[in-house]
Image: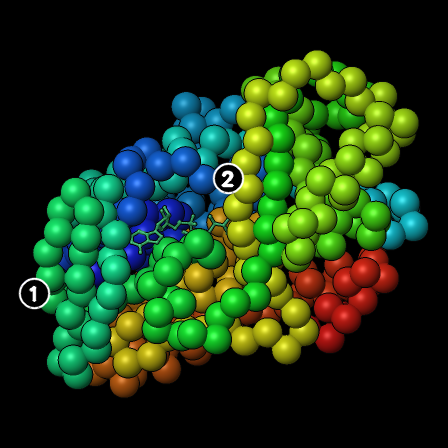
Amino acid sequence: MYDAIIVGGGPTGATVGKILAEKGFSVLIVERCKLPRYKSCSGMVIKKTIELIDKYFYCQIPDFVKCSPLDNYGMVFVNDEGKEYKFEQRGFNVWRSSFDNWLLEKAIEKGAKVIDCASVVSCEDKDDCVEVTISGKTSSTEKARYLIDCEGATGTLKRSLFSNDKDYITTYQTFNNGRIDLDPHYFYAYLQPKFSEYDAWFNVKDNMLVLGVAVKDRNKIKAYYTNFIDYMKSNHGLVLQDKIKEEKWIMPCIYPDFKINYGKGRILLAGEVAGFLNPMGEGISCGIESGYHAAIAIADNFGNSENVLHCYIQNSREVLAYMKRQWHLVGLMSNKFENMKNM
Ligand SMILES: Cc1cc2nc3c(=O)[nH]c(=O)nc-3n(C[C@H](O)[C@H](O)[C@H](O)COP(=O)(O)OP(=O)(O)OC[C@H]3O[C@@H](n4cnc5c(N)ncnc54)[C@H](O)[C@@H]3O)c2cc1C
């Protein structure tokens, strides 16, 4: 019997695992992919994330998880009408595989057990524990007092537990050799409707030009992406030499009456799978923060599962309020996201 089984070894799962293990609880983290696992991401670590890592992990982000340019100076939003808003804020540019693995090692150092190449395929709340079926490199049925689902947007466990969860945005991004006349230290988000049904973006990672679009309808990826590339060629001197790779992923679709799913009984949801996601897909900070609150709720109320969920929801109020303030700001900048002013 574990005290906690955590589904997923991303930033959320690593935070839950580190905090609980540090407090003396027995923890198993189950990760579907081989570690270090790849995650499609822009890899922008914002100032808030740096502060959270300092606060919860008591350390600074090492250079070996970063890519060039190492420093991110902030974000440039271009709204529906092409008006630019620049937000200066110091952050870092990381490769998620190295960054997430580094966080996971912090959980292991505190005593969490991690298995990779294995998925949690089902779980059942049995009143005094959760029965968890694991399948893959290691296949077994385990028991834990609590299960914390941190499987990110792609996870299937949540969908098996809560069947109404179907609202996703698809992201498509390419990594290219080439050149452009934009400052590589910024992350650029373009909100013009002809480039995406959400946002289009540009950033630089280890000299590769990353260009992406996000859509609700996957059939529209090619058309939006072509419009975006044409715009970047005419407005920013983009010259594409060769495409190194392309990738698709999904993100939760957030809308004004969106509700965070905190879980039920002994099963908690944290991070992106619960719906914590800031505008333009910034999700590492709220993953770490919600993971921390889930862990503290368990640690403080271990013997009383009814209090755990209540405490988790209460403790997460500020993460949610921050998320809503960010969406509100985007709603003020852009007609496309105007309804998010009411979030
Ligand atoms: C294109 C793109 C760009 C982004 N850019 C940024 C950015 O620049 N900055 C930022 O902060 N955020 C960004 N995000 C969002 C960010 O990646 C996520 O919000 C963040 O990774 C969420 O962390 P998590 O730990 O909740 O989930 P994840 O990082 O997705 O981790 C979940 C883990 O669970 C594993 N898993 C899934 N199902 C199972 C299962 N059944 N059993 C076992 N393991 C399982 C997965 O393999 C995965 O490793 C971006 C997202 C996308 C798609």
Q: Which residue lies furthest to the front in this view?
A: 219
**Mark in the foreground, 1 or 2:** 2
- Residue on which disc 2 sits: 40
Q: Residue furthest left?
A: 1
Answer left or right for 179 relative to 22: right
Q: Marks 1/2: CA distance?
A: 34 Å
Disc with the residue nearer the chain's start (1 vs 2): 1
Residue at (69, 63) in percent of width and height = 327
> Mark 2 belongs to which amino acid?
Ser
Q: Is mark 1 within 8 Å of ligand 1?
A: no
Answer left or right for 183 relative to 84: left
Residue at (67, 49) in percent of width and height = 219
Horizontal and vertical percent position of residue 150: 36, 58
Horizontal and vertical percent position of residue 194: 83, 48
**Residue in the foreground of this view, choosing between 85 and 223:** 223
The answer to whether 113 is drawn above or below residue 287 in the figure is above
Answer left or right for 325 relative to 161: right
- Residue on which disc 1 sits: 1
Residue at (17, 62) in percent of width and height = 133
Q: Is mark 1 on a helix, strand or loop?
A: loop
Q: Toward which corner of the image does residue 28 lie, by quadrant?
A: bottom left
Q: Residue 217 carries which label?
A: none
**Residue in the foreground of this view, choosing between 202 and 61:** 202
Residue at (57, 60) in percent of width and height = 168
